[in-house]
Image: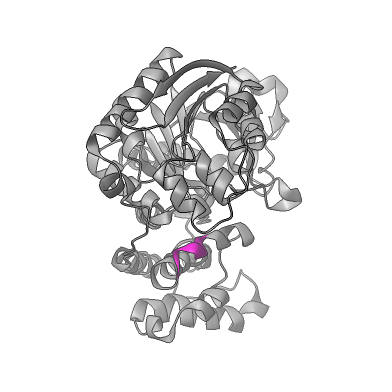
Amino acid sequence: MKIHKSSFKDPNGSVIEFKGAIVRVIKNNYVKEYDHLMSSGLFHDLRSSNLIIDHQEIGEEIKSELKSDFYKAIKPSVVTISYPSEWTFSQLKDAAIATLKIQQIAIKYKMILKDCSAYNIQFYKGRAVLIDTLSFRFYIEGEPWMAYRQFCEHFFGPLLLISKVDAGLSALFNAFIDGIPLELVNKLLKRRNKVSLGVLLHIVLHTRSKIKYKSKGHHATYKSFNADYIKRLTEDLLSQVLKIEWNAVSNWSLYYKEDVSDAYLHFKIKTVSDLLLIHNAKKILDFGANDGTISRHLGGLGFEVIATDSDQVSVERNYLMCKREGLTSILPLVIDAINPTPSFGWANSERQSFFERIEVDTVLALALIHHLVIFYNIPFYKIAIHFASVTSNLIIEFVPKSDPMVQTLLQSKEDIYDDYTRDNFELEFSRHFKLIKKVEMTNSERLIYLFTK
């Protein structure tokens, strides 16, 4: 048993790793809050609304291994952890909506969210849910909502930056682990973006009030913060979040729709599906999934898929299609293949890197390797070593230099890639994997390989 690296800030509990599972330990100083959460009907209401992760109480199993301040231990459902910098606009928006709905329900039971960190929301079976069961405290009449600023810095402000300025600004989450500061949001927003009452109230005036009352600390009490005021504040924030829209296009978001023939795509999907069945795959990382066309097909077959791409519009399209089609086994994420999310935060370990967080039995890398080699100058041997560190099973597509897509890449570069050959590709990957099968694609010189260890 050991305490999880990210678990050191909450005095009411800890997250531990116990017999290969993640367990949340509740300390004695949180007894009243936890008991009220469970007995008042609040937890049942949130769970029925698909707004909180379910859990099992397992305290007796680990009682002898815990300290004396232990009250209970709960084992939540298994979730693949993702970070807000990896979410699309609509994922962040859905997470914001879920947070505010949780607040609305909690206040009915005389509780309130004590924090509104985006990291407390995760995507489970296609829905944004709260995973921190210890996020609630009793509401005390007259006290302000302490998490209001945090909500604006984790949700409202970032949504405005993505929508009004640039979607790439979501990467600021990795630089500001406690949320994008309101002062920075206020500076980055254009003057025309600040004319709405919501932005004026929750960003501009909020920024000024934060500076004004900074000397009073976070415990300043304002008589106007009664339950009705907090309800109205929550309702207004929800209304403002619902109004924010993001419309964008990219060169890659319509790749499978416009640049690939139906016959080729159908053959490719069948080939991949057949190869997955050979080694009884269950959980797949589709690395470079584009708009998720193949990922969604695999999800429909019952596979669990983490579908990543660096193109924000493509991932947004995938997420919205999954919602529309009711596909709950797919997690679309914005991940740059050459620069995936690193470890960051305290001691560079508070938040784990992308590859530390995911557990898959198969990596799918289709129409990707030529971009890595030709565009980013990453040699085959480096790619093979990396994939071998991530998975035991690899389905990868080799795109020869004669392919039109490779030729397009070479139009703006000197062709220094003499070792970009099928033989060298097979040699380097065979150093780390065993070749099980390779399939020639119809009407193409491309090949799809199944490697395993």
At horizontal 36% and vertical 85% (from top left) the residue drawn is 195
Residue 295 is situated, as x and y percent measured from the top left of the image, at 36, 35
Residue 348 is situated, as x and y percent measured from the top left of the image, at 73, 49
Q: Quadrant of the N terminus?
A: top right
At horizontal 52% and vertical 59% (from top left) the residue drawn is 412
Residue 306 is situated, as x and y percent measured from the top left of the image, at 45, 36
Q: Main secondary structure of the magenta part?
A: helix
**Which one is in front, 262 or 124?**
262
The residue segment tinted magenta is 166-170
Give left or right: position of 28 versus 315: right
Q: Is residue 41 visible?
A: no
Residue 59 is situated, as x and y percent measured from the top left of the image, at 58, 24
- The quarter of the picture where residue 352 lies is top right
Q: Quadrant of the C terminus?
A: top right
| Depicted 135 relative to depicted 236: above or below | above
Give left or right: position of 266 versus 227: left
| Depicted 419 relative to depicted 375: above or below | above
**Which one is in front, 10 or 20?**
20
At horizontal 61% and vertical 69% (from top left) the residue drawn is 219
Q: Is residue 213 magenta?
A: no
